[in-house]
Image: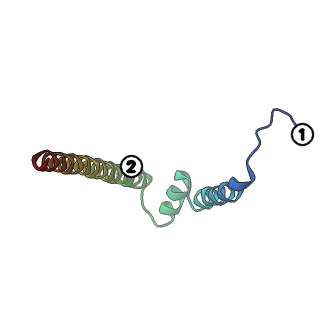
Amino acid sequence: MNDKEIRIPEEIVPEVLELASRYYADYTQSFAESELVAAAKEVRIPAEFIQQAIREVQRQRQQKLERQKKATQQRQRLLSVGVGIIGVIALSGMWTYN
């Protein structure tokens, strides 16, 4: 065994193997663009429409991810503001009654 080889702690091995198997499953369940073009050709769909559709679906997915990220950030900001307001109210209440 190589002394410089990275050692993986036993407690994370199951998680690593599970994640690797998901990556592999995703990889084997995907298609190369050339495979899609070939399949489309069999049903007489021109390659340029497949390529256009690929770009459009990828663009839509990217926009969806960006919207989700923006919504998450907005929720976090609102939560922070809410916590701040509650803190101010609590402090003013303590100050008023002391």
The residue located at (44%, 53%) in the rendering is: 47
Residue at point 37%, 55% (across, down)? 57
Tell which tag, 1 or 2, sits nearer the viewer: 1
Left or right of 87? Residue 42 is: right
Instruction: Indicate the position of residue 14 as horizontal and vertical percent values.
Output: 69, 59
SS at circle 1: loop
Could you tell me which secondary element the residue under label 2 belongs to?
Answer: helix
The total number of labels drawn is: 2
Tell me: 50 left or right of 82: right
Residue at point 69% right, 57% down? Answer: 17
Which comes sooner in the sequence, label 1 or label 2? 1
Q: Amino acid at mark 2?
A: Arg
In percent of width and height, residue 68 lies at: 32, 53
Residue at the spot 74% in from the left edge and 46% down from the top edge? 8
Place of residue 24 in the rendered image (x, y in percent of width and height, measured from the top left): 64, 57
Looking at this rendering, what residue extends furthest in the bottom direction?
Answer: 43
Label 2, on which residue?
A: 55
- Residue 16 has which mark? none
Outermost residue, front direction? Answer: 98
At label 1, the amino acid type is: Met
Local crowd size for mark 2, using a 10 Å CA cut-off: few (<14), some (14–19), many (≥20): few
Within the image, what quadrant is residue 7 found in?
top right
Label 1 belongs to which residue? Answer: 1
